[in-house]
Image (cartoon, rainbow, N blue to C red):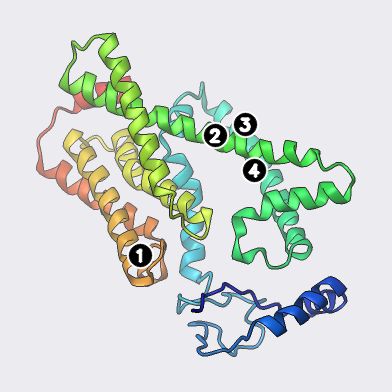
């Protein structure tokens, strides 16, 4: 009986030289050659980049599945739109954006946040480019790169205990984000749907019990979904961020700046954007047999999500009567 083993082929000159000089690896290779027979029975060329000279160092990069390349022009343009507006459309961020005292505060905040994110992300780029050299082969399990890199660097520096502090920081940020989203989902269901719409006279004891129940259910569902996680954590981040933006960005924007917008249009915009997001994600999973959204015409699904949300919101708002003042008052109360 044979088992499939995931292998990473080392091809860069520096990696080959490093391995060829490591006596321990050479001894292990000799032992493996005696115990294991390897035979290539099938090769799958890149869909984009096969036999192209310089494809690894020029745009758009090789890709095993995308005929337009790893980072096609449409994808790159889409992400320039995605990250600024996708982050703005997060419910927690919207509350902060509406809390500015005046336009001067907003301008100062934009400059400050720009510098802040530039420092953070530039440092990450440098760190993980160095990690690619220090830990060759981590492409197989990329989510382990950060903790393994911290352990390697601190061990070489003679202070391995510092690795615990370095790893604790991002995990603390992850836990903070997770509990914030759990509370957000719980409060939205219990306060905004159950108490506001279904049972306005519900007691605090009932609301408390219902909040605990919803939090537990959502937490268990999250655990079940990560039993078989995608290859890259970034895929989940993009999926969640794009989904929230697809649901809220267009309805909130039109509610602020379009006098004709009403409650029915807001609901239609949320359903249209979310529906398109789920359809394209499901289509990509069916086509690639992995967690990967379908990029229609080479554009990120986020672009099509916003288009579907805007179309649904505008059409429904124009064709349905609504009390604009009541909708405005409800929106302001949020």
Q: Are marks 2 and 4 in contact (CB under 8 Å)?
A: no
Q: In this view, does 94 lie to the left or right of 135?
A: left
C-alpha gap between disc 4 and disc 1: 32 Å
Q: In this view, does 206 lie above or below 227?
A: above
Residue at 42 percent of width and 42 percent of height: 223
Q: Please name the residue that numbered disc 3 is placed on.
A: 108
Question: At which x and y percent is residue 19?
Answer: 81, 75
Task: Report crowding for label 3: few under 14, some 14 to 19, many 20 or more residues within 10 A (C-alpha).
Answer: few
Question: At which x and y percent is residue 17?
Answer: 84, 78
C-alpha gap between disc 2 and disc 3: 30 Å
Determine if residue 22 is in view: no
C-alpha gap between disc 2 and disc 1: 28 Å
Quadrant (top left, top right, bottom left, bottom right) of the C terminus? top left
**Earlier along the polypeptide chain: callout 1 or callout 3?**
3
Instruction: Indicate which disc residue 93 carries.
Output: none
Q: Do the residues labelled 4 and 1 touch (CB within 8 Å)?
A: no
**Earlier along the polypeptide chain: callout 2 or callout 4?**
4
Task: Report crowding for label 1: few under 14, some 14 to 19, many 20 or more residues within 10 A (C-alpha).
Answer: some
Q: Is residue 325 above or below residue 266?
A: above
Q: Please name the residue that numbered disc 4 is placed on.
A: 117
Q: Please name the residue that numbered disc 1 is placed on.
A: 285
Q: Please name the residue that numbered disc 2 is placed on.
A: 175
Q: Do the residues labelled 2 and 1 touch (CB within 8 Å)?
A: no
Comparing labels 1 and 3, the label whose residue is closer to the camera? 1
């Amino acid at each position: 009986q044979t088992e499939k083993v995931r292998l990473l082929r080392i091809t860069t000159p520096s990696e080959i030289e490093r391995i060829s000089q490591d006596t321990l690896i050479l001894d292990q290779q000799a032992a493996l050659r005696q115990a294991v027979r390897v035979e290539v029975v099938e090769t799958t060329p890149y869909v984009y980049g096969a036999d192209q000279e310089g494809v690894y160092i020029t745009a758009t990069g090789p890709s095993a599945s995308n005929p337009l390349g790893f980072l096609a022009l449409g994808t790159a343009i889409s992400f320039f739109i995605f990250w600024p507006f996708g982050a703005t459309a997060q419910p927690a961020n919207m509350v902060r954006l509406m809390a500015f005292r005046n336009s001067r505060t907003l301008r100062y905040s934009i400059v400050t946040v720009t510098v802040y994110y530039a420092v953070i992300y530039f440092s990450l780029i440098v760190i993980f480019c160095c990690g690619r050299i220090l830990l060759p082969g981590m492409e197989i399990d990329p989510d382990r790169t950060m903790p393994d890199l911290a352990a390697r660097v601190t061990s070489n520096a003679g202070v391995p205990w510092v690795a615990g502090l370095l790893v604790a920081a991002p995990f603390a940020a992850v836990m903070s984000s997770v509990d914030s989203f759990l509370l957000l989902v719980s409060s939205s269901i219990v306060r905004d749907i159950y108490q506001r719409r279904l049972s306005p006279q519900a007691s605090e004891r009932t609301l408390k019990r219902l909040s605990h129940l919803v939090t537990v259910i959502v937490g268990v569902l999250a655990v079940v979904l990560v039993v078989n996680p995608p290859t890259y954590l970034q895929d989940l981040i993009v999926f969640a961020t794009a989904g929230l933006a697809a649901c809220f960005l267009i309805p909130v924007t039109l509610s602020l700046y379009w006098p004709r917008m009403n409650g029915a249009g807001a609901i239609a915009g949320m359903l249209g954007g979310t529906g398109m997001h789920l359809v394209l994600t499901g289509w990509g999973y069916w086509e690639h047999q992995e967690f990967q959204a379908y990029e229609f015409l080479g554009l990120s699904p986020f672009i099509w999500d916003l288009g579907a949300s805007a179309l649904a919101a505008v059409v429904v708002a124009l064709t349905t009567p609504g009390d604009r003042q009541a909708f405005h008052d409800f929106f302001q109360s949020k």
